[in-house]
Image (cartoon, helix red, strand yellow):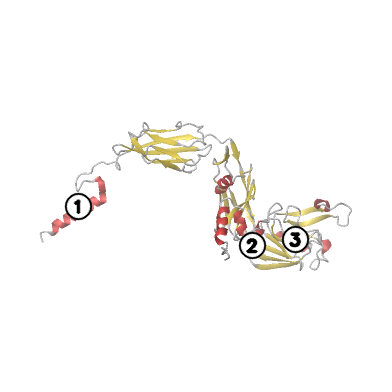
């Protein structure tokens, strides 16, 4: 029984050592180590390839931090700009040098914290700051559409002030364009041309969604001497799912709200030679009154197809002049014949209802027409006519992934013997 108290004493000492670690010697007095010491000022030991406090550092040059190898070594470097973007870097094995491995932003304020350790193991620290010079050329970016409430088919746009052609430069731009939606969706950017990108989800936006877009391109190098600038963020909300489907062969339009039919309307569409475009279109805007003239679509005055008409309740679906509108002059043909010059015509009462029901971004789809297919770009928003797989290939970031998937899925042909 005399051994039990001794065992408890040894156990308690062991636990004390385990909990306090190197700060104690056995069960004795604490000793000071490099972990508990206050870092010394390493300003004398640490140098970098610039002037602390400068406002014109060249963003094209990498940041380099060095120490005298016989006095100390670098243990860590944290370099970040005022926006919180950290600079990636690489530390030499012997701790004598650290250098950035990614370009610095132009016109940005940087703070650098260098942690060191001297030959005796004591920690040191040096903090310094500087500002990079502005970029020589600026790439401005504007998001669209304007803030507001839209239909489920509304794409986002990003318009650049200068062309970006190189795939690597496009990847830099696209990587900086952030789109967040609640609820979350699977979506992607598509390079329409060198200065314009469109963003859409795989399927239509969910009703009631909130969509935000912002850019982190400010100060980022896109190409030689070309740097991004600050961009105003965008917020839009999504309304009910309104989808109007016109069957040009049956001469009727069916309008659904969130999947339920809310109206069936007799219509007339484009006659032979002026057939309405097939495919999905997106409402671009609404105009209570439009003066429509045949000359605007190339029809000479005085010919049999010439017209000059006052049109009311006009809902635009293409930039070239295709509308859904009131056409009281063709009520007798609505529901049984196509007599228009490409627009979808209906009675004034039905056109007024349609005008009040839809908003920009709602879906207007045409099937059963002899007309050509709706252009994906250039004449409104035909984005939804592009299959999702092809859409992803229009992304500078996802194109390579899609091509790799295609190669994996491609059937392997066995050689003939």
Q: Does residue 185 appear in this view?
A: no
Of pointers 1 and 2, the one earlier in the residue sequence: 1
Q: Quadrant of residue 161?
A: top right
Q: Point out residue 78 in the picture as x, y percentages from the top left corner.
A: 42, 41
Quarter of the image for the C terminus: give it. Answer: bottom right
Residue 353 sits in quarter: bottom right
Q: CA distance from mark 1 to mark 3?
A: 88 Å
- What residue would you read off at disc 2? 241
- Say whether disc 1 or disc 3 marks the residue closer to the N-terminus: 1
Residue 312 location in percent, x, y? 78, 57
Q: Is residue 228 left or right of residue 68?
A: right
Q: Nearer the viewer, mark 1 or mark 2?
A: 1
Q: Nearer the viewer, residue 1 or 192?
A: 192
Q: Return the residue nearer the eye: 147 or 308.
A: 308
Locate residue 121, reporting x and y percent.
30, 39
Q: Secondary structure at mark 3?
A: helix
Cα distance between the residues tagged 3 and 2 = 19 Å
Secondary structure under tag 2 reads: loop
**Label 2 crowd bin: few (<14), some (14–19), many (20+), radius 10 Å:** many
Q: Residue at x 88, y 57 (%)?
A: 304
95 to the left or right of 293: left
Q: Left or right: where does residue 10 sit relative to residue 237?
A: left
Q: Residue at x 54, y 60 (%)?
A: 408
Residue 110 in sight from this viewpoint: yes
In the drawing, what numbered circle is on residue 46? none
Residue 106 in picture, x, y percent from top left: 53, 37
Are there few (<14), some (14-19), or many (20+) residues within 10 Å of tag 1?
few
Q: Earlier in the sequence, mark 3 or mark 2?
A: 2
Q: Is residue 257 above or below residue 15?
A: below
The residue pinned by badge 1 equals: 13
Instruction: State which mark lies toward you, 3 or 2.
Output: 2
Q: Which residue is mark 3?
A: 352
């Amino acid at each position: 029984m005399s051994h039990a108290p001794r065992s408890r004493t040894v156990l308690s000492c062991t636990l004390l050592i385990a909990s306090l670690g190197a700060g104690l010697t056995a069960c004795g007095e604490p000793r000071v180590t490099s972990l508990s010491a206050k870092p010394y000022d390493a300003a004398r030991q640490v140098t970098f390839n610039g002037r602390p406090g400068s406002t014109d550092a060249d963003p094209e040059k990498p940041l380099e931090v060095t120490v005298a190898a016989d006095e100390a070594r670098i243990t860590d470097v944290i370099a970040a700009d005022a926006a919180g973007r950290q600079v990636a870097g690489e530390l030499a094995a012997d701790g004598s040098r650290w250098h950035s491995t990614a370009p610095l932003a132009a016109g940005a304020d940087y703070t650098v914290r260098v942690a060191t350790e001297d030959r005796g193991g004591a920690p040191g620290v040096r903090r310094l700051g500087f500002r990079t010079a502005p970029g020589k050329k600026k790439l401005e970016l504007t998001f669209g559409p304007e803030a507001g409430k839209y239909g489920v088919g509304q794409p986002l746009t990003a318009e650049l002030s200068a062309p970006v052609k190189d795939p690597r430069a496009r990847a830099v731009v696209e990587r900086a364009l952030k789109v967040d939606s609640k609820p979350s969706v699977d979506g992607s950017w598509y390079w329409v041309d060198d200065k314009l990108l469109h963003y859409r989800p795989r399927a239509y936006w969910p009703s009631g969604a909130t969509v935000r877009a912002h850019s982190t391109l400010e100060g980022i190098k896109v190409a030689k001497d070309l740097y991004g600038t600050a961009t105003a963020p965008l917020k839009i909300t999504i309304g009910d799912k309104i989808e109007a489907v016109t069957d040009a062969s049956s001469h009727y339009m069916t309008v659904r709200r969130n999947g339920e039919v809310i109206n069936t309307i007799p219509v007339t569409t484009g006659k032979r030679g002026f057939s309405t475009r097939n495919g999905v279109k997106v409402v671009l805007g609404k105009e209570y009154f439009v003066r429509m003239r045949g000359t605007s679509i190339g029809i000479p005055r005085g010919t049999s197809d010439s017209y000059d008409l006052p049109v009311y309740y006009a809902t635009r679906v293409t930039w070239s002049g295709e509308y859904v509108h009131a056409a009281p002059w063709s009520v007798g043909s609505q529901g049984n014949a196509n007599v228009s010059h490409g627009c979808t015509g209906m009675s004034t009462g039905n056109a007024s209802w349609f005008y009040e029901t839809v908003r920009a971004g709602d879906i207007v789809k045409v099937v059963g027409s002899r007309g050509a297919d709706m252009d994906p770009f250039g004449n409104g928003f035909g984005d939804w006519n592009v299959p999702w797989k092809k859409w992803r290939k229009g992304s500078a970031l996802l194109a390579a992934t899609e091509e790799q998937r295609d190669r994996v899925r491609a059937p392997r042909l066995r050689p003939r013997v």
